[in-house]
Structure formats: C-alpha cells, structure tokens
Amino acid sequence: MFITHEMTYAFMKGEGRLLAIPGGVDDFREIREGGYYFVDKSELVSDIVNDRSKVFLFTRPRRFGKSLNLSMIDAFFNLEYKGNKWFDGLKVNSHPEVEEHRNAYPVIRLCMKDLFVSRRDMFLPMFKGMLSRTFRPFEYLKTSDKISESLRDLYLGKDPVYFEDARALDFIPALCQMLEQHHGVKPIVLIDEYDNPINNAFNKDTYDYVVGFIREFYSLVLKSNPHMSFAVVTGVMQIAKESIFSGLNNLRVDNVFSKKFDERYGFTEPEVKDLCSYYGHPEKFEEAKEWYDGYRFGDADVYNPWSLLTYIYNDFEPGTYWADTSGNDILETFLDGLDDSTYGDLVALGNGKTVSKQIYPSVSMRDVGGDLDAVYSIMAVTGYLNAVPKGDSDYRLSIPNRELYKVFYENVTRSLKMDVGVAMRRFLGSMERKDVPKMEESLFMLFSKNFFDILLRDEADYRLVLATIALGRGGRYDVGIEREAGNGRADIIMRRNDPRYPNIVVELKKSRSDDPGDLERMAEEGLRQIRTREYYRSLKGKTYLYGVCLQNKKAKVLFEEMDL
C-alpha cells in the first residue's frame, strides 16, 4: 500500500507494522505486493502518455531507480496484468487521461545487463539466449490462428537460441508484428540498460563488433519498426559517436541535465524526510543530507536512492553503499590523468568547491583515457560529480556528498600505495587531535618510502598531499594553499566548516643542513611566522598552529593552540 502521513501516525501509535526497506528489489509488482515501502514515482506514467514521443531514452547513474521505473511502466501498460491493485492510492490516479492506456498493450521487455562477454564468439550465443528469455511470456503465439503463415514459419518453429544471425537481429520487430496481429494493438517495447553491452566491451577486442551489431539491432527495433506503439529505453550514458540512435525520429532524450522528468529518478528532500520519519528517526535527516544529497537532475535536487535506503536498512549507519556496488574504473581513469592543472581541480573539489568545465551529455567511450574533458563528462553523467549549468556547455562541477568525498579519498590513497594511504590517514587524524608525535611519525613514514621525493625538492610542491588532505576530510574544511592571511601568505590554512573540528594553520620549512638542531630551529621559525604575521586573524574558535620542518626524511612539528 502507499504510505501516507496518517498511516505513519497510526503505526507510531502501535496500530500497524513497518513496511520493509526495498533494498535491491527493482520489481514494482514485488514491492507493491510484498509489504515494501514505495516512494511514489508513478506520475512518470502520465508524463509518458502526455508526451507522446515514439522513443524515450532515460539516462541516469546506476541504481537511481531506472529498472524499478521500467518495471512500473510494464505493470501499468501490460495487458497481462489487468485487474491488478498495484496502483491504488498512487499519484498517477489523479490523471484521468491515462485510464484508456491502463493494461491495454502487450509489452516486450528486453534486459541487456547480462550481455557481458570478453570474446566475440560468445556474444551472439548470449544475445540469442536473451531473446529466448524475452520470448517465453509469448509462447501462446505458437498456437494463435491470427499469426500469418510466413511469420510463423520464420520465427515460431524453433527457439531463438537456434536462430541464424540475421534472424536473431530482426526477431524483436517480427515479435512486435506477431503481437499486433494477435491482439490488434501495437506492443510497447522496454529496453533496460541498453548501453551495457557497449560499456562492457570497452577496451576489449570485441568493441567494434559489439557496437556494430547493437547499432543495427536498435535501428531495426526502434527506427524501422512500424509495429510498435512506443519504446522506453534506459541506460547510464547517452552514447554519442557510436551513433546508436542516429536518424531516429521522435526521440525524447532525458538525461541528468534535462528538466521534464527531473524528479522521477532519485529521491527528493520531502521524500527523504518522510522516509526518516517513517522509520522513527526524523533527527537523522541532516546526516542523510550530508551523506547522500547533492545531485542535480534538471531543476531538481535529489538524493541517491540506493544509498539512502541502505543507510536506513543498516540502522541509519552511514557508509559508501552506492560506490561499493560496482567498480570505480572511471574515477581511476581520472586519477591516472592528473597533471598540474587537474591537481588544482582535485584540491578545489576536495575543499567542497566547484570547478568549471565543458560538459557534454552525449559521450563516446573511445574518448576515455585520451580526453580528460570526456572523463569529466562521464563522471558527471555517471554520478561521481554533480554538474550545474552556468551557460552553453559550461558547468560547475562538485563532489556531491560525503559518500563521494570518501570514495575520492580512498581512491586517491589507493592510487598512491597502501602504506602511503595509511600514513596519510594517520597524519590527517593526528593534526585534528594535536598529536605531534604521531604527525612526525606519519611524515617519516611517507618520506621514507621515497614516494614524496618531490616534496624534498621544493616547499611549494605540496599539491598532492593537500589534495589528499582535502579529500580525506570530506569537505569539512576549506583548505587554502599559500592563501593571503593576516600580514602575509600562509602555506596551509584549513578553515573549519564544522564547529566540532579545529581550524588548522601550517607553516612549512625545509632544512638543507645536516645539523639536527636546525630541524627544531626552523620548525620554531615557522610557528613564530604564523604568530607574527597573524595568519589566523580571520579564523574563529579553536585553532591549532603547526610549525613543520622537513630535513631529508625527518620531520619536526611544533604546536600551539589558540581560542579565537
């Protein structure tokens, strides 16, 4: 049943039981029959009816509700489900114009998510197996006296797994024609994860073959098919240069930058507040917002639905739930491509700031690795970065939330080395705890591994360390490098964004002398410079001052605390 505020109040009085969290359940019928909480996105149905496009392409990051919405569309239009009660109490019922379409069409559902192959000779057998599974609900056509003899002979005499290649390519258009002949109405075609075969073939020998085959298949199904009422296609990316949808008329593309269907994928703020309240913890809303908000689809601010539901299921314990469901190859590509300018971008992103880039919703997998701008575009459409338009193709990019800050940081440290990442985490924590011995120990561990030799050459070259510091603290600090402060320029100022943590000011020195006493003298000089030039002048609250001197692989840290 649909959740209302009155029902929530009745439960709180002990008159009912909580509905289950639908974590991992993307079947609309199962959710509606199985006692699961459902966030009502049913007006997507009326949006589609009123739009009247021939083909709808919805692209969103993975696990943002695409498969569930496709299942809901099937449940509403599919004539197989006449008389169901699944939509009772849902918003779509306030749109009377959709009633004539309710359970009025045969529906063909294609799921491309399992077409993952590394060898060309494996692709077609798996593709034909997918066709066989698609046909199973329509076995009744074999005994229909309404099917033309030519179609019966070509397509109904054997299982699709035994079709020759050409027959496999045109089987879905033929199935549309046979369903139209049997029912007297053109069917609806639903394709889930249309781009999965292409993404899976990327950087493999099968890529060109898979792209060519899939292009021809989609052209036959979606472009040259007069026996289809309309189609709804979902995927993560709007693939560009591969020309999958070239020449397709009446195509409605809705991506993360589009406005028409912006609230139909992901959870809105009122929906998240209702979820937190329903499960007994309205006070957790701010934490949920910090960890899982931050996405902008069209004009709508939305939360990550997978992470939010998993967070509630795990007794409101925050974690990197969305990122842990798949590999983070695109983020690794970004980190591999870092140069001087992108180091600066990483620092800004880690500070909770935005960077401006040209972003294109249509992307080509061929550009990944060779064009960093294409990587930014893919990171935006796949959910790793939030993108807000500022004009033409220019967008303001930012890390969406605490979950993604943590993912960025973990991948940065992993891209360094295991022991370097450990030392970095210790260094970050010891700075906030004013644990000077641990700071010195962590710096020694870093430099003794010969990874940061660049730091021993030039005091100014701390970009990578500072980027990691910023990312590691998930936006809780505004980190400034050589920022004007007081009567000069401070090496590092970490201005807190959260009053639970201290402000931090660091002045770095490097000793070229072999005199051990020089370490402490120069660390003291750094601390004195902070005081005399008042680098802390604009800070408020608890503030930690650090004078740090590096000498080969040794480090000396001196500390002072102020309450401003």
Image (cartoon, rainbow, N blue to C red):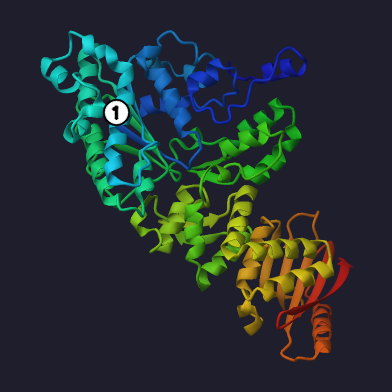
Which picture quadrant has residue 221? top left
Q: Where does the N terminus fall, quadrant-wise?
A: top right
Front in this rendered view, residue 289 or 148: 148
Q: Where is residue 555 in the image (x, y as percent from the top left)?
A: 76, 78
Q: Mark 1 points at which residue?
A: 131
- On the rendered structure, is 328 left or right of 535? left
Report the residue at 48% width, 53% height from top.
329
Above or below 133: residue 318: below
Which picture quadrant has residue 247? top left
* Residue farthest along the left direction in this orientation: 150
Front in this rendered view, residue 159 or 323: 159
What is the secondary structure assignment of the residue under circle 1?
Answer: helix
Above or below 388: residue 506: below
Amino acid type, callout 1: Leu
In this orientation, does residue 198 appear?
Answer: yes
Q: Where is residue 270 in the image (x, y as percent from the top left)?
A: 63, 32
Q: Position of residue 25 (x, y in %)?
A: 53, 27
In this orientation, does residue 391 appear?
Answer: no
Report the residue at 39% width, 63% height from top.
371
Front in this rendered view, residue 544 or 358: 544
